Image: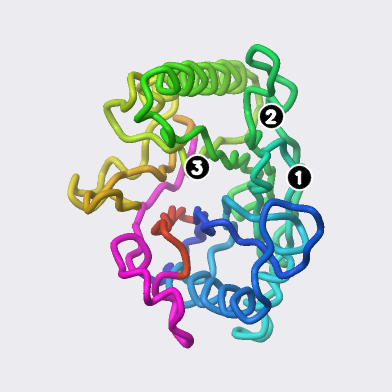
Amino acid sequence: MPAPAAEEFTIATQNLMRLFDDIDDGGAETVPTARYRLRLAKLARQVGEVLRHPHVLAVQEAENQKVLAELAEAVARQHPGLRYQVVLLEGHDRGGIDVGFLVRGDWKVLKAEQLLARARLDRAFLFDRPPLLLRVQTPRGPLDIVNVHLKSLRGSDDRAEAKRIARKRARQAGALAGWVRERLAARQAPPLVVLGDFNAVPGGQGGVDVLGILQGAGLRRLEAGLAPGEQWTYVYRCRGNALDHVLASPGLAGVGRVAVSRGNAGVAGRFAQAPGTALRSADHDGLVLYLRR
């Protein structure tokens, strides 16, 4: 990734590919200690060497706050003097994964809260991983950042299940779009960035245009300026898919560019066991938004 210029700061998103620790605490997954330590070291390289130490990093698929804190410690070991604050609130995901943030230690966190956490669809929570709102003080003033990890299409090969999944994805997009409309209509509210793993491609998929619904609420997709062949962040059945996105309110000033990392999606799985490199530290590539101070 390009290093930020002296007059820039960066906001990034990275799916961590089910980062679980080596402690059997009744959760969905426990991994061997050696594998967990290797994953932390590789992800720390991803944060530092590939994403270039973003000022705010939105992450998806972290087990809990402890795991995210240990990732922050791994970053600090590789890059002494660089400290990240950890923000993670537990959601409802039965698989035990959550969304969270790493925030540079010299930045002030003003607020952190889950959005739409009690919204329901039939008898279940609408969001297994509720969107997480972070308000931080940036060089340009307060900024609201919403980290999302929306429902995937996993299981859609079954027709009945596909209908259920499409309904949930449409309701999630609609609920989030409703919140965005209210938020954009509010006076004196900080600029807004919504980013993360949307599990959705431009133009729609599985009968639902998630991004279209959110753009219809007033957000603009910032990575749309990349060449179409460079927007992919995940590879499924040998095809690149743009599943991770950065959207923003019209009032966000100082937007420079969005860049996509390489070295995870599309890289052979055997590199996940290779030490000393960030290659295949996860299965998604990261996105970085560059903003002028």
- The residue that label 3 is drawn on is 195
Instruction: Specify whether 193 is left or right of 241.
Output: right
Asked if 257 appears above or below 279 in the picture, the reply is above
Pointer 3: residues within 10 angstroms few (<14), some, or many (20+)?
many
- The residue that label 1 is drawn on is 89
Depth check: give the residue in front, 29 or 176: 29
For the point 41% across and 56% down, the residue is 284
Residue 208: horizontal and vertical position, in percent?
37, 20
Count of picture labels: 3
Magenta range is: 252-280
For the point 65% across and 78% down, the residue is 74
Residue type of the residue flagged with mark 2: Leu
Q: Quadrant of the N terminus?
A: bottom left
Identify the disc placed on residue 115.
2
Residue 271 located within the stretch drawn in magenta: yes
Identify the disc placed on residue 79.
none
Instruction: Specify whether 278 is left or right of 47.
Output: left
